Image (tube, helix red, strand yellow):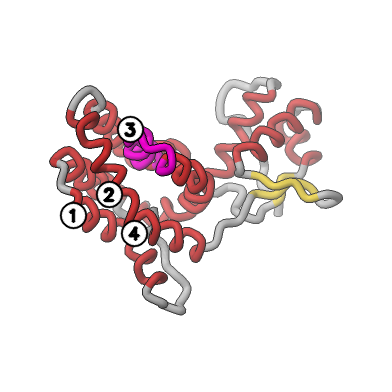
Amino acid sequence: MDHKFEWQEQRTTTPEGVYRTLRAAILDGTVPPGGQLREAHIASDLGISRSPLREALTKLEEEGLVVKIPYRGAFVVEVSPREVAEIDSVRLHVEPYAAELSAEALRGPERPQLLQTVEDLRRAMEKDDIPASIDAHLRFHRLFYDLSGHGILQGLWNGWETKLRLYLSVDHRTYSDNPHQLVVEHEKLATVALEGDTDAFRQELAAHFPMGLRAQAGDAGEPTHRHV
């Protein structure tokens, strides 16, 4: 059964407003990976014409959240646990290096930005705001790459971010019984990053997404949640 789409904010018929509404439905898991975004259904629910809807879908496609299949329609992109496990296994090697390169900036002018992402994550998790918690979660990790000054590292993160964002739309729900857990994990990562302890950062990161390591070690079983 198709989900009934509703405005997440004051009703607006602009493509940007439609985009934000559809994006929230994707990231909070309302429309799951592989789910179809039916134009007629959405237009009827939101009381809009097809024109702003199609512009919104195009923006979601450019962002990597939606794929358009000829003669079939628009679908939310699917990301497998194995893909995320493989990303994690690479991140375990490169993210500590990114943290090391960004340490000076993080201990100086960018320190408030790092701490703010943890606070934003805390507030979003307490409110059970899945899209906001995903945004804060990814901003935290992206900060190390952005501040590293290393173009290759930044390019790696850019190539991963959409897949991680989609997977987190499911993964963040596993923290619903203990939303503080995810915040504590990021507080620990922030602490060791500010201390400049690369080895400790790698250890905390491994604990943060252990399934990537298990897949790398050849575990044939289906990975459980707690990636990224």
Q: Mark 4 points at which residue?
A: 209
* Position above or below: 133 against 116: below
Q: Earlier in the sequence, mark 2 or mark 3?
A: 2
Compared across the picture, whether 186 is left or right of 160 comes to left
Tell me the CA gap for discs 1 and 4.
16 Å
In the rendered structure, are the residues bearing label 2 and label 1 in contact, judged by CB atoms less than 8 Å apart? yes
Magenta residues: mostly which secondary structure? helix
Element on which disc 1 rests:
helix
Q: Residue furthest right?
A: 71
Using the image as rendered, state which of residue 29 and residue 226 is in the foreground: 226
In the rendered structure, are the residues bearing label 2 and label 4 in contact, judged by CB atoms less than 8 Å apart? no
Task: Give the residue type that dot 3 points to.
Answer: Leu
Label for residue 162? none
Q: Mark 3 points at which residue?
A: 147
Q: Name the residue under label 2.
A: 96
Residue 228 screen position, x and y as percent: 39, 53
User: Residue placed at 81% from the left, 39% from the top?
Assistant: 40
User: Residue placed at 48% from the left, 44% from the top?
Assistant: 161
What's the magenta region?
138-153
* Position above or below: 78 against 158: below
Tell me the CA gap for discs 2 and 3.
13 Å
Using the image as rendered, state which of residue 187 and residue 148 is in the foreground: 148
Tell me the CA gap for discs 1 and 3.
19 Å
Tell me the CA gap for discs 2 and 4.
14 Å
Q: Mark 1 points at which residue?
A: 199
| The stretch drawn in magenta includes residue 5 | no
Q: Can residue 124 be seen in this view?
A: no
Tell me the CA gap for discs 4 and 3.
22 Å
